[in-house]
Image: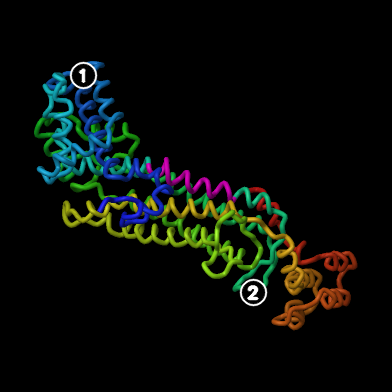
Amino acid sequence: MTISALTAISPLDGRYQDKVEALRAHFSEHGLIRNRVRVEIAWLKALASEPAFVEIAPFSHATLNELDAVVAQFSEADSAAVKEIEATTNHDVKAMEYWLKQRLGHNAEVMKVSEFIHFACTSEDINNTSHALMLKTGRDMALLPAFDAVLARLRELAHAHADLAMLSRTHGQPASPTTLGKEMANIAARLARARDRIAKVLLTAKFNGAVGNYNAHLAAWPDFDWEAFNRRFVESLGLEFNPYTIQIEPHDAMAELFDAVARADTVLVDACRDIWMYISLGYFKQKLKEGEVGSSTMPHKVNPIDFENAEGNFGLANAVLRHFSDKLPISRMQRDLTDSTVLRNMGVGFGHAVLAAVSMLRGLNKLEADPARLAADLDACWEVLAEPVQTVMRRYGVANPYEQLKALTRGKGITREALHAFIGELDIPQAERIRLLRMTPASYVGKAAELAKRI
């Protein structure tokens, strides 16, 4: 069977392939092989540029340009050639090493020092550095832009509806009013904080040989400061150097990143559910799209499917990401291979997170507030003013203010007229009585509008 959007096992490569296209360059098999080639070429160039290694002549500008071109022009056909060699070696990194030697076989300068390709490296030196580069670019070029688009739209909604009063619901029951914009601002603030934590994770890499002690390096050049040299090499790639490892980099930084992404996903699951409820309550309408249907049998339906899709995919992302966080930092003794197959699914975790963000953004862009529905809800709940009335009563020493308002309102609801009659009998200054009488559920929103505009 030919693999296509209709025959792919994973919906990320099928139904949703266009939504996660930005991730392919970073997390595909081709992306992994390309990053391995990048690391190998960078390592060979670093060795050739070190004066202490007199056995490796510095490369000419022409050769340096060709080495850079191997990385810059690395194609899917090149990846396929590496995979063809792997069919014989049954070892992916060794296959890439052999391909590099074949690819540069015409270059006399490189061939003279060809055995310094992959010099003193364990495969994991190449792989862990490549994985760190994949995560760094995937995060910065695909994941964060997807979250940033959601964040920008939330801010727009917060500002647009900063003054639009809304009935709160704590425990699902009418509570002190807020504004629709402030509720969007709450989500934006949480996402901004979570996004910042994702961006600040420093991705680590190790380049210290078979079990992390520079054994092979020192066998060749026993008096050379390999730790300092390899630190500079790793940092030149934009990564943080990890000096203490076994054969593998322990993946703690990866786990930190995956946990940070999962935290952002959880914030947005919470947001999707709340917005779903606001749509259900009629606070938001959804813009219609010509030709769309909401039900195969009920023509009137306009379902909040984007938020449902987003919630489901954020959940899938977190199931994968949290497995990564739990599993990857664990390795038996100096090395086992259980991390290898797991790491090949990094794009799956990121893919579902990006897909969810795309779906959520689509849903957010369809939202239209219904001020009349919001106003009607507020006007039906004058009992929410029991809080400010009893608070003012406390200020002026009225006895048992909470208990009085509880007897008047709890579980009953109350009309505007009944509440005003109660206020009219209060032993408080006339100016305060007038202020309370002028208060409405829609005006009792505290600093909600100010906070919404500030985000």
Task: Give x and y (percent) for residue 300.
Answer: 61, 66
Q: Which residue is mark 2?
A: 173
Q: Please state which amino acid type lies under the numbered disc 2.
A: Gln
Front in this rendered view, residue 320 or 406: 320
Say if the magenta span includes residue 78. no
**108 relative to 377, above or below:** above
Total number of numbered discs in the rendering: 2
Can residue 449 be seen in this snapshot? yes
Task: Give x and y (percent) for residue 112.
Answer: 11, 21
Q: Residue at x 16, y 33 (%)?
A: 99
**274 relative to 143, above or below:** below
Q: Which type of secondary structure does the marked residue at label 1 adopt?
A: loop
Q: Left or right: where does residue 401 sit relative to residue 109?
A: right
Overall secondary structure of the magenta stretch?
helix
Front in this rendered view, residue 298 or 252: 298
Q: Please state which amino acid type lies under the numbered disc 1.
A: Phe
**275 relative to 154, above or below:** below
Q: Residue furthest right?
A: 430
